[in-house]
Image: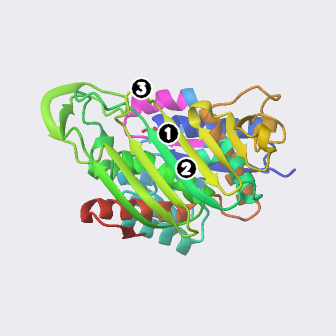
């Protein structure tokens, strides 16, 4: 197989920078890939921390100015793993320079930005992707296949929650994710965007929403030192929280299905509880990220006496992506979802196709986020 090396410039080196670096490194080690990622340049502002990350994750070079990475002729793909306020400027500059652009989620901080980003990649004719990695849990991909095969029949309900608790303590400091300018929104954009993407992927487009956004803790200690999402030193000075702590909405899908979506960072005990249930005319499925190697399935086609939820262990060679890892029953984890996204994206690009999900999905997800925000303000149902 003729291999092509795709030289990557990764902007950002913290949580997502680490997840993406791992995915680029592992993908060709476990999957046969026609196009292979090459970890060329990693970029961030703090030179010392950046160098440590580069050494640890295996990047060839470091750069402290993202503009210089984009200017380089030897870089093919720009990966945007920064806080949200930098997604649009970096992605648009990268597209204008003719680079492939892969961007963290949510695509943008606003609908307007998302539209400009979609336009930029379209105009430049470059490949684009957005990192909604949960589509790439084997159990979620299996759920997609089962729905396509008609095993659930006509879909009536999509019921999704994404629950975390990392800011439930009111003394937790004002990190960038609690600042509207940097993050665009709170739990809404950060984690509702994931379950919106899953709803659209599995069930279809959303037509109308009725939602509510809430900020429980309106002031928090400002950060004294670091701006790490996982903490940092709190100062004695207080500052405004400018994003939502929790976001929930009802949805009507274009195909008639109903959806409920709840995202919060105030569900004590829930660390990364991304769960959905889908009910159709022939059966139901349940997925829970905390048991991500499993998919629950109830089939009304079973003999009446045996009906009940069964648990499919999605680790077999016949399941999406799993055959390239370990023998059946040898489970995989969170980081593998990013690897699968990379493998699939590179496979598609090698065939001349755009990865999926892409900026069009990012824009559609953003339209839903925006409609929910409008609905929370208007107290009415809003069209997407
Ligand atoms: C933080 O809430 C976060 O890391 C999100 O930003 C990720 O997208 C999600 O997968 C896990 O939680």
Q: Is 41 one of the magenta-colored residues?
A: yes
User: Disc 1 versus disc 2: distance between alpha carbons?
Assistant: 10 Å
Q: First in sequence: mark 1 or mark 2?
A: 1
> Is residue 158 something that shows in the picture?
yes
Q: Secondary structure at mark 2?
A: loop
Question: Which label sits on residue 364?
Answer: none
CB under 8 Å between discs 1 and 2: yes
Q: Secondary structure at mark 1?
A: helix
Mark 2 close to ligand 1, CB under 8 Å: yes
**Residue ID at (76%, 34%):** 315
Q: Position of residue 58 (x, y in %)?
A: 60, 32
Q: First in sequence: mark 3 or mark 2?
A: 2
Q: Position of residue 343 (x, y in %)?
A: 71, 47
User: Disc 1 versus disc 3: distance between alpha carbons?
Assistant: 23 Å
Query: Mark 3 sits on what residue?
Result: 269
What span is colored magenta in the figure? 40-55
Query: Mark 2 sits on what residue?
Result: 131
Q: Is residue 259 left or right of residue 376?
A: right
Say if 342 sits above or below 356 in the image. above
């Amino acid at each position: 197989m003729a291999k092509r090396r795709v030289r990557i410039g990764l902007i950002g080196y913290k949580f997502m920078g680490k997840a993406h670096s791992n995915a680029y490194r592992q993908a060709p080690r476990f999957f046969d890939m026609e196009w292979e990622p090459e970890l060329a340049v990693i970029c961030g502002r703090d030179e010392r921390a950046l160098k440590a990350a580069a050494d640890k994750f295996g990047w060839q070079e470091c750069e402290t100015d993202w503009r210089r990475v984009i200017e380089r002729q030897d870089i093919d793909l720009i990966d945007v793993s920064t806080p949200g306020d930098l997604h649009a400027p970096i992605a648009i500059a990268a597209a204008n320079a003719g680079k492939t652009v892969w961007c963290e989620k949510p695509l943008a901080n606003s609908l307007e930005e998302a539209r400009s980003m979609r336009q930029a990649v379209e105009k430049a004719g470059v490949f684009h992707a957005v990192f909604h990695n949960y589509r790439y849990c084997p159990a979620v991909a299996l759920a997609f296949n089962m729905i396509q095969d008609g095993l659930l029949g006509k879909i009536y309900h999509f019921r999704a929650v994404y629950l975390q608790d990392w800011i439930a303590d009111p003394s937790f400091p004002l990190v960038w994710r609690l600042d509207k300018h940097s993050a665009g929104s709170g739990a809404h954009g950060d984690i509702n965007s994931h379950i919106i993407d899953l709803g659209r992927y599995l069930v279809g487009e959303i037509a109308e929403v009725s939602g509510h956004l809430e900020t429980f803790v309106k002031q928090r200690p400002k950060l004294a030192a670091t701006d790490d999402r996982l903490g940092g030193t709190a100062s004695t000075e207080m500052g405004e929280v400018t994003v939502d702590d929790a976001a929930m909405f009802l949805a009507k899908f274009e195909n008639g299905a109903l959806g409920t979506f709840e995202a919060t960072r105030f569900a004590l005990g829930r660390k990364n509880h991304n769960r959905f249930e889908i009910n159709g005319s022939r059966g139901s499925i349940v997925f829970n990220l905390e048991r991500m190697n499993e998919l629950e399935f109830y089939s009304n086609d079973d003999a009446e006496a045996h009906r009940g939820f069964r648990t499919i262990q999605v680790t077999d060679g016949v399941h999406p992506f799993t055959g390239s890892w370990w023998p059946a029953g040898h489970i995989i984890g969170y980081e593998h979802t990013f690897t699968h996204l990379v493998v699939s994206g590179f496979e598609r690009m090698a065939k001349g196709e755009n990865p999926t999900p892409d900026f069009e999905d990012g824009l559609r997800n953003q339209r839903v986020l925006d409609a929910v925000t409008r609905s929370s303000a208007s107290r009415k149902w809003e069209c997407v």
